[in-house]
Amino acid sequence: PTPPKPPYSEAFAHYLSDPVVPGDDCLNLNIWTPQPDPGARLPVLVWLHGGALTRGSSAVPVYDGHAFARDGVVCVSVNYRLGVEGYGLFPDTPPNPGLRDQIAALTWVHEAIEAFGGDPGRITLFGQSAGAISIGALIAAPQTQGLVRRAVLQSGPPEASERAKVRRMVRRMASRLKIPATAEAFAAVDRDLLLHTQAEVGKLSSPVVGGPAFGIVIDGDTVPRNPLEALTEGGAAAGVELMMGWTRDEYRLWLVPGGLLERVDRLGAVAFAGAMARCHCGSEVPRGYRALHPEASTAEIVGQLVTDHLLRIPLHHLADARTEPSYVYEFAWPSNLPDLGSCHALELGFVFDTGDAPESRKLAGEGAPQELADEMHAAWVRFATDGDPGWERWDAAHPVRVFGDRAPDAENGVAYTAYGPRDRELALWATDAAAVTPAEPVRIGRRSRWRG
């Protein structure tokens, strides 16, 4: 069974699959192993799916783990409670039950995976979007210290949501349902009605718009402080090696379905004002993006600005602050479908080597390059096996491995795209890396910054 969740809207369902398997025993996991022998001591990958903490499950065919088992890795995928049942904030129940589900699953894997051929000393967490955000909280949680050797954060930074924002989501649902905002009252509501109400209230929960949404909150227990602070300043996850990255056009999955891309373009200056409010920055920042990319549309600049603020800058900061090895990548292959570009979640069929699945083709289109899947899948296997995905670790030069660029660096396909991670007023959005020398200043407003 999959966790209870509302279906995607028709616009998103055109690109994303989210099967429903009915039943109450949704807290389950899948295991693929090439050798169910306690003496095999194989590396272990534990997958946490994305879906904004409201959708998704381990049953999505794109997440099939056969290719990892084929290549000598035990692969585990985990379900966890979603939406108001997993991340609602109530006065009569502990916060973050979905995250607690993940901790329980990870503890079970550490204790039991040896019987399936896995090495409990070589567990790598990997997840995308909300799954990556969850991993940031998990590796910082006091209850998981020593359980994880490595972690991969795909298109999701460590973060904690504002408690007031999550409460607002719950209270709006309670108002529509005409019930008290308590866990007891919500548990008594018909589940279909509950999910329908959640979907209606959460319509403006897009990362670009920033409406009410569910999220992981600081709770004094599993999340004693903001996970990004715990990992960069608090010494959490000591010894855990990291791999992290993003897609070049994350925002296109948020804006293309439903025609939001065109609407943002039409809004013009109003869209820029909204982006400045979303990113807590002044007008010099979008002006800087426009100076760097005079040919870009309003939607493109707004999308990249929000992506930098929410995703790239925190991950740069995380990589800079860690003393353990970190590796950073960018996925740049554009979908064969119109307007999607290198959008959010597009890399998943390549990482799992499931590009032949119809569910992968919904996002990638026909003819996705198998050689790119071979390359990415092998990098994830290498990282889980010995901690080296096959490119330079993050250092002062800020190397970023670019996957799928149709005009890669002729020598090694590595672009250097770091732009000062601690300055939120600095554009990270890459231009042609080959056209910029390491000591060329990039002017943004009245300030001059350096990139290399």
Image (cartoon, rainbow, N blue to C red):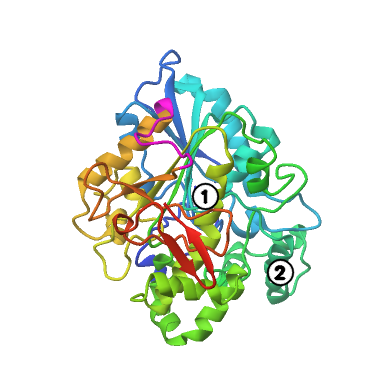
Seen from the viewer's position, the closer of residues 144 and 23 is 144
Residue 140: x, y in percent? 64, 39
Determine which quarter of the picture holds residue 343: bottom left
Q: Dot 2: within a 10 Å radius of its alpha carbon, few (fewer than 14), some, or many (20 or more) residues?
A: some
SS state under label 2 = helix
Visible in this render: residue 353?
A: yes
Label 1, on which residue?
A: 316
**Type of residue at label 2?**
Arg
Residue 239: x, y in percent? 58, 28
Label 2, on which residue?
A: 168
Visible in this render: residue 61?
A: no
SS state under label 1 = helix
Q: Is residue 389 above or below residue 135?
A: above
Q: Give the magenta-colored segment's residue range.
A: 385-396
Q: CA distance from mark 1 to mark 2?
A: 31 Å
**Residue 192 falls within the magenta-colored stretch:** no
Earlier sequence position, callout 1 versus callout 2: 2
